[in-house]
Image (spheres, grey):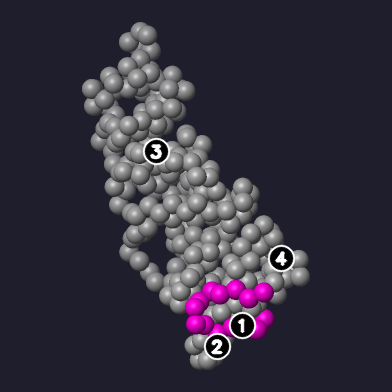
Amino acid sequence: MATNQKNNKLNKLLSYWKDGVVYTSPWLSENGYTPDMLFGYKKSNWVKSIGRGAYVKAQDEPLWEGAVHALQNQLKYSIHVGGETALELQGVRHNVSPRLNECHLYSPSKRKLPAWFTSYDWGVEIKLHISTLFGEKEPGIKSMELKNSVPILLAEPERAILELLSHVNSKATFLKGWHLIEGMMTLRPDLVQSLLRSCKSVKVKRLFLFMAENNELPWYEKLKISEIDLGSGKRTIVKNGKLDSKFKITVPEEIIAESWI
């Protein structure tokens, strides 16, 4: 390849390479950037490697958002930011934290994440959840631009709260969900209805509806509960808790005893 062509390809690459974004070897190869070219770019201090098969601009510091973007858009992982992280990024939080400490990722697939992603220090703790809460379906996921206008897929609040509730197994995690959902006044009932129909966890659906009803959230009355499969029998949410007679789940006793609901 002539020198001018090589320079043009490098300039083209750098022109749309956003700060913080990781570029991967498979994507670069598919777009005409050979290993020899990448070796030359590294030698000339245009790019640097952050692990096998992953590159960033030489003077740049990669962001976790840019890494997740690469997983989703370049390597085609079925993965999204969800649960507590998705809620926090969209302004739904109970305690105001100065910075994000954890990044919760959800995937229905057991596909192994690349070593460059799992071994790099992103400044947040990466937590991957292999979740079949909605099977292979992807309702309630959207693209959102974060730092440096990097778009990533994340769960909308209606889905993210259900993902968070799937981890409730103690009084502490129950109360975290309770305090978050009590402020979620503007959820869209049509999307909530669709998600509850798709959700495969009876426990999560009952817990969500219990919290929504007892916090008197305005959209709750618009749901068609009879069209949601809530299973049969009792479900233990919190050990040694009090059984709610309507949704047949155990909740912290003081929630009822102290008239929180």
Of the residues shown, which amino acid type is indicated by label 2? Ile
Q: Which residue is mark 1?
A: 244
Of the residues shown, which amino acid type is indicated by label 3? Pro
- Characterize the local packing of mark 1: few (<14), some (14-19) or many (20 or more) Cα atoms within 10 angstroms: some
> Which segment is the magenta one?
233-246
Give the quarter of the figure containing the C terminus.
Answer: bottom right
Q: Are marks 1 and 2 in contact (CB under 8 Å)?
A: yes
Across and down, in percent, residue 185 comes to 58, 72
Comes first in the chain, label 1 or label 2: 1
Q: Main secondary structure of the magenta part?
A: loop
Comes first in the chain, label 4 or label 3: 3
- Characterize the local packing of mark 3: few (<14), some (14-19) or many (20 or more) Cα atoms within 10 angstroms: some
Q: Are marks 1 and 3 in contact (CB under 8 Å)?
A: no
Q: Which mark is residue 256?
A: 2
Tally of numbered discs: 4
- Characterize the local packing of mark 2: few (<14), some (14-19) or many (20 or more) Cα atoms within 10 angstroms: few
**In the rendered image, is residue 144 in sight?**
no
Comes first in the chain, label 4 or label 1: 4
Comes first in the chain, label 2 or label 4: 4
Comes first in the chain, label 1 or label 3: 3
User: Depth check: 254 or 84 in front?
Assistant: 254
Across and down, in percent, residue 74 comes to 47, 34
SS assignment at label 2: helix
Is residue 148 placed above or below 103 in the rendered structure? above
Q: Which mark is residue 55?
A: none
Confirm whether the magenta stretch covers residue 144: no
User: Depth check: 240 or 93 in front?
Assistant: 240
SS assignment at label 1: loop
Tell me if 87 is positioned left or right of 195 in this view.
Answer: left
